[in-house]
Amino acid sequence: MVNIVHQWLFTALLGLLHPFFVSVIDINHNQQDKTLEISVRIFTDDLEKTLQQYGKTKVDLLHPADKKATEALLAAYLNKQIQFVADGKAIKWQLLGFEQIKESTWCYLEVENFNGFTGLDIRCELLYDYEKNQINIFHVKNKGKEKSYKLEYPKSTVRFDF
């Protein structure tokens, strides 16, 4: 029993000394609506620190002083850090908005009039400028199938074939 408590305390201490830097990007082709729906989940404190460096201004995602300016900064950062190419054609997304859920910020992106893809290339350097231990996990749903991939710094590209 004492050994289990010591192991748990050691694991908790190790987690405090070596925090995790993880973002999750979900990509779903909605065939019915002909859209590509993208959600990006990022730890809020990491995102705020990165945006402050990127925009050279104080950022508070939970209580933004100017929500439109914050959305514009967020969209510019995400646009620089994440690009998609479907079947050889670059696709542009628009930021629908963001919200705070517990310790994370969820960003919602969408591509309208999207008919689908057989291959999706992604270049992602999300938070690489903030933390070299950053991991970006992708979950891509297309044609009733789901594929996932863990992208770790310094690797910045991944391809999904369906």
Image (cartoon, rainbow, N blue to C red):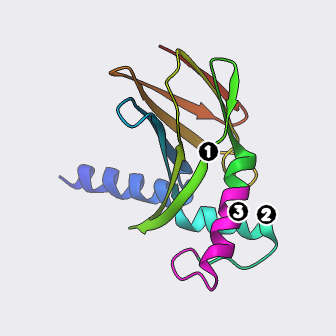
Nearer-the-camera pick, 2 or 15: 15
Query: In the image shown, does 134 or 121 lie closer to the viewer?
Result: 121
- Which residue is denoted by mark 2 in the rendering? 54
| Residue 6 visible in rendering | yes
The relative height of residue 86 versus residue 55 in the rendered view (above or below) is above
Q: Secondary structure at mark 2?
A: helix
Q: CA distance from mark 3 to mark 2?
A: 6 Å
Residue for badge 1: 93
Q: Find out whether residue 73 is within the magenta segment.
A: yes
Which residue is label 3 attached to?
Answer: 50
Taking the image as shown, residue 137 lies to the left or right of residue 132, namely left
Residue 120 covered by magenta stretch? no
> In the image, what residue occupies the spot 53% across and 20% down?
117
Which one is in front in this view, the residue at disc 1 or the one at disc 3?
1
Residue 128 can be seen, yes or no: no
Q: Which amino acid, by three-letter code, is at mark 3?
A: Thr
